[in-house]
Amino acid sequence: MTEEDAVSEQKLREDYAVLENARAQLDGLVRQQQLVQLAIDEHVRARETVKSLAKGAAGDEILMPIGADSYVHARISDRKEAIVGVGSSVSINRTPEEAERILDIRVDELSRAFKSLAERAAQAEGAIQELSERVQAQIEQIESRGKP
């Protein structure tokens, strides 16, 4: 094996390691996107529930989402406040309108985070494509040198 062959193989190993790292990063970004989408869905359901409660009259029966696509029957009370989490296990009473605004803001923030993750994933996919082509070319070059 010539020194040039050794350098080529070392470069191939390095590029392959970078390619595998990029693939792992893309997998992580995809998982993050899935989690953000779940959070968006949850906030949208909460917002829609608050809207339903605000429109209903005391004593009206509604289906209340409890998670995992499951619901329970509930009656609207004469108290119209919603309890909204504000972080660190702290929740506060808000009017339905305030709760809806808070949830809208969170959905917007989560949507921006999802878009950012999608952009980063697209960049990672581009880098993976480029690296894959480079690694394939290096493999072909090394194999062609080995043939008489």
Image (tube, rainbow, N blue to C red):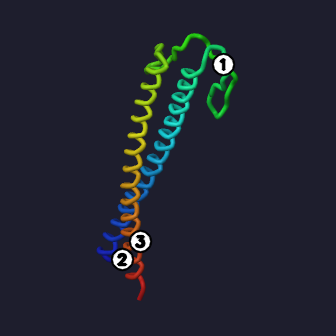
Give the foreground label among 3 and 2. Answer: 3
> Could you tell which of marks 1 and 3 lies nearer the N-terminus?
1
Figure check: 20 above or below 71: below
- Contact flag, marks 3 and 2 (Cβ < 8 Å): no
Residue drawn at (51%, 16%) of the image: 83
Residue picked out by circle 1? 60
Q: Residue tagged by mark 2?
A: 1
Between marks 2 and 1, how big is the CA–CA gap? 83 Å
65 above or below 57?
Answer: below
Of residues 34 and 10, the one nearer the viewer is 34
Q: Secondary structure at mark 3?
A: helix
Task: Write the residue at 59% across / 10% down.
Answer: 78
Q: Which residue is mark 3?
A: 136
Say which quarter of the image contains residue 72. top right
| Few, some or many residues within 10 Å of mark 3 (<14, 14–19, 20+) | some
Task: Name the quadrant containing residue 125.
Answer: bottom left
Q: Secondary structure at mark 1?
A: loop
Q: Position of residue 61 (x, y in %)?
A: 68, 21
Which mark is nearer the camera, 2 or 1? 1
Q: Is residue 136 above or below residue 47?
A: below
Q: CA distance from mark 3 to mark 2?
A: 20 Å
